[in-house]
Amino acid sequence: MLLDLKQAINVFKNLSNRPVPTLARFLDTSPITIASKWNILDVEHTKKVHFEQTFFSTQENSFISSPPTEVDYTSRVYSPSSKQSALLLNKKVSGEDEQSFEIWNEIGLKKVYNVKKFDHGKVHPPSAYIGSIRFSPDGKHILYIAEKKQKEEKNPYVDNEDDKSRKNFEFQESFGEQMGSFKQTVLCILNIETGECKIVDVLPSAVTIGIAEWNLDNKSVICIAWKTLPYKLGLIYCPMRCNCVYSINLDENRADLLFEDENLCTLFPRITKEKIYCLQSKTGGEHCRTARLAEIDIKSKSLRVIVDVVDQPHNNGFPGLSPYVVPPSRCFSKNGDQLHLSSLWGCDEALLSINLQTRSVKRIPAPEGFSSVSVLDVRDDVLLCICSAMNQIPVLGICRVEDNEWSLINPPKPLNFTVERKTFKAKFEGKSFAPKEFNGLLVKPENFDSKSTPLILSNHGGPHSCFTTAYREVTAALAISGFGVLEVNYRGSLGQGENSIRSLPGLCGKQDVLDIKQALDEVLKEDGFNKEKLLVMGGSHGGFLTVHLIGQFPDLFKAAICRNPVINIATMVHSSDIPDWTFIETGYERFDFKNLGDPEVYKKMFECSPIKYVDNIRTPLLIALGEKDRRVPWRQGHELRRSLLARGACVKTLVYPDDCHPLDSADAQCDSFVQFYDWFYQHLQS
């Protein structure tokens, strides 16, 4: 029985009120003490709430905790001993953004430093691509990444020589989507005792520093620097941009090139025993590839491959490493011979232990009842993880590597719906090396009825990403409210080896669409859903697929929803922050920075695009757009909207003015669930 809108809102509200862990770290392991950060979506007040909580293990292998404390800092990092921490805060002061560092020790607040007094611009919080905040091994300094300070210029209309009021209107290119303030960065070293901030600007002008890690000697820093010529391309979700690895000697103010290969992108450097361990994937091409684990010797600069790329996994075996999943900053075993990280494995985020000597990969089983595990911290051969499943709200879990024994902190009961894994033998042949199978996930509500239960076909974006068995709030809310949900990892998705990824470019709008349609047909036949109650939704490339499906199969679905959809690849070339995507997914092997396209290129792009089928579309369509989206600019959705209105089709458009590509603001999350649910509910009744 499908819940009405008011009942469904209560379901979503109850799920949103459940805290979800986002960060955690061991403060000690004997006994275990954990500092953690959690998020809640407060739908009543339309805001995201963040709080901290500390957990302490007891002799009975259970945990007691401190009361939750709401926090509003941007980032907290700990010293190696965990006895000090640094907070980066962003606040509005007299209407202007102001940043500061707070240094805390075991007694209390030790120092406060206003960033405005330093000779640089905005500090970037830690991230996968640009932004690091790290204590030095001795705990006396902090490194971080900030914007270079803009040169102040004299107003030519003023005689005062001390005047610096002239505004600079010269265009400065950023790194695109969600990184509009990331333009020209610099390494900074803060002495936490004296407050002295040293600007270390020693890299070549053709690169900009992204990620930095202290070397164990306290005197040098290992960093990843992104190449920026001839112009910058969008960086977020694109772990395949050209970069290089430097060692910066802080005493001599000198940068030494450790590794550079124009065909390899190096990510997530982690350092132990004079060696750097990092993920590397091929540059150019698809926006997420399978990665390899490499070792760079800091002294000799030699490189050794520990775990290579996997083209095709055998019998559901190891499919290679995913550069979408960031290893924890502390990831090594006590003796330094093992590296622990999570990676995509089929439909799961799997916990892996890699022996750096034998180069073997071991999968550590998830705790019973859970399927996806994301490791956050490693200390004394104990792993701290987030464990979840589609019907299990995320919890913190502790795994002892010695015996793979798990302890979970306050695990909740499973939610009332079922999840089935599906495997499909591909009917569309495609490229010669394309996998013969693909997978998916089928969610059924507790009171499934083949006649009355509606089925939502949900499409993921990318196209090179995937649906996993990790918990997703909206999917859970839909299932509890009475919907079935089918999620298909068509060929081109991650977690199935490199051949899966490479099989899709040039066949977008065909192979992915046919794989999804085949999966839907088989589920309808085997699981008995009502063909008159089919719905479809997706975002980004998933929106591209949604519009393809309602265009190629115009009488199949009762209603459709797309979020920030790719509609016309040809008109996206010069408006997206990743123009290379438009060429690669259309079937061109490499992106040429000089290639502005020509009529034949644009024709090929149009032929791949769902706008080609606009005359066929009869399915009621809801379009949700983020006005600040630089990945798939909102005008893509408006191009479809105008085309449908001109043809008398049923279309409704939502625009979230402050949202980027993910539509993940509190406003967008709270409003879109209501809008989406109501759209499907109303059109099922008609």
Image: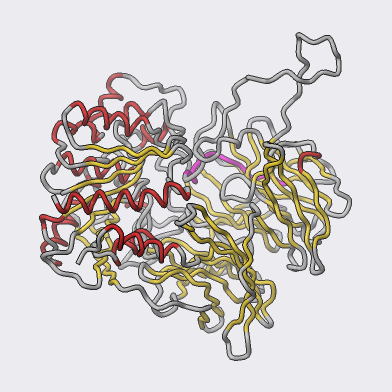
Does 242 lie within the magenta span?
yes
The colour scheme applied to this rendered structure is: secondary structure
Q: Position of residue 461 (x, y in %)?
A: 35, 47
Q: Position of residue 424 (x, y in %)?
A: 21, 61
The quarter of the image holding the N terminus is bottom left
Check the image and report above or below for 53 versus 204: below
Q: Nearer the viewer, residue 504 or 487?
A: 487
Residue in view at x 44 percent, y 77 percent: 412
- The residue lying furthest to the bottom in this view is 60
| Left or right of 159 on screen, residue 586 | left
| Segment colored magenta | 238-247
Q: Which quadrant would residue 207 be assigned to in this image?
A: top right
Q: Which quadrant would residue 71 be assigned to in this image?
A: bottom right
Q: Position of residue 436 (x, y in %)?
A: 23, 57
Check the image and report above or below for 376 versus 685: below
| Left or right of 126 on screen, residue 137 | right
Q: Position of residue 203 (x, y in %)?
A: 71, 36
Label count reads 0
Does 601 lie within the magenta span?
no
Q: Nearer the viewer, residue 441 or 515?
A: 441
Residue in view at x 63 percent, y 30 percent: 206
Residue in view at x 62 percent, y 62 percent: 70
Check the image and report above or below for 26 versus 506: below
Q: Nearer the viewer, residue 320 or 61?
A: 61
Residue in view at x 82 percent, y 18 percent: 163
Check the image and report above or below for 153 versus 423: above
Q: Nearer the viewer, residue 479 or 61?
A: 479
